[in-house]
Amino acid sequence: DSGVTQTPKHLITATGQRVTLRCSPRSGDLSVYWYQQSLDQGLQFLIHYYNGEERAKGNILERFSAQQFPDLHSELNLSSLELGDSALYFCASSVADRTPYEQYFGPGTRLTVT
Amino acid sequence: EDQVTQSPEALRLQEGESSSLNCSYTVSGLRGLFWYRQDPGKGPEFLFTLYSAGEEKEKERLKATLTKKESFLHITAPKPEDSATYLCAVQARSNYQLIWGAGTKLIIKP
């Protein structure tokens, strides 16, 4: 158990809908990262927050957005969902933002868009 | 351009047959190299961090080594439970975000 929690574990929804994925980082970690992993694909970095502030964006679509709240939990919002958005979405946390500290991953949310 | 390449894509071994996985990187200054293990449908599990050439780290049957151009994950006398995808990631001085390799899928047959 990494100490990172994600809810829900599974989500099935229809095209065009909007969903919110939630992540709670490990106690003491200030950074939260979001990744997307499609079937048999590598990890695609989406976005990074540190202590409530956006630090970096990766391959994140305009239909996707995220935020980190004062209690450090984070939410990833996915809107106007398409079939191709079906994937595993992982949240990871780390102590710092720029120094090379390891990231600890949550169990993921499996999103299925039908 | 910063890049990480893992090889082979897949590796099938008999139980007890030792081997190595490779992670080659091209980055403008290495800040750290990370190894993770990922089981199907699960989140990656952190294994090692290496910071400089010549560094080695061990954990049970796994040993990670680092040179200026690549890292190896050596697995000694593997067991079926070592079957997983092993991911390598690099943090470069030019970009604080991790650059991920595509992974090596390791299958250990009893």
Image (tube, coloured by chain):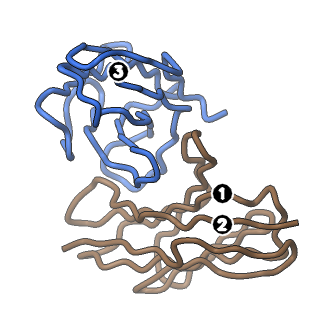
Chain colours: A blue, B brown
Residue at disc 1, secondary structure: strand
- Residue named by callout 3: A74
Percent coordinates x, y for residue A107 in the rendering = 56, 32
Name the residue rendered at 17%, 20% in the picture.
A80
Taking B47 as reference, is B21 above or below it? below
Residue type at numbered disc 2: Leu
- Residue named by callout 1: B84
Check disc 2: other Cα within 10 Å, few if <14, some if 14-19, many if 20+.
some
B95 lies left or right of B56: left
Viewport quadrant of the C terminus of chain A = top left
Of residue B59 and residue B12, the one placed in the foreground of this image is B12
- Residue named by callout 2: B106
Label 3 with label 1: CB-CB less than 8 Å: no
Taking B81 as reference, is B13 above or below it? below
Name the residue rendered at 38%, 13% in the picture.
A71
Viewport quadrant of the N terminus of chain A = top right
Percent coordinates x, y for residue B58 in the rendering = 71, 69
Residue type at numbered disc 3: Ser
Percent coordinates x, y for residue B96 in the rendering = 27, 55
Percent coordinates x, y for residue B62 in the rendering = 72, 69
Kindly indicate the quadrant of the structure image that contains residue B100. Answer: bottom left
Residue at disc 2, secondary structure: strand
Residue type at numbered disc 1: Ala
Q: CA distance from mark 2 to mark 3?
A: 33 Å
Indicate the chain on which mark 1 is placed.
B
Check disc 3: other Cα within 10 Å, few if <14, some if 14-19, many if 20+.
many
Name the residue rendered at 72%, 59% in the picture.
B83
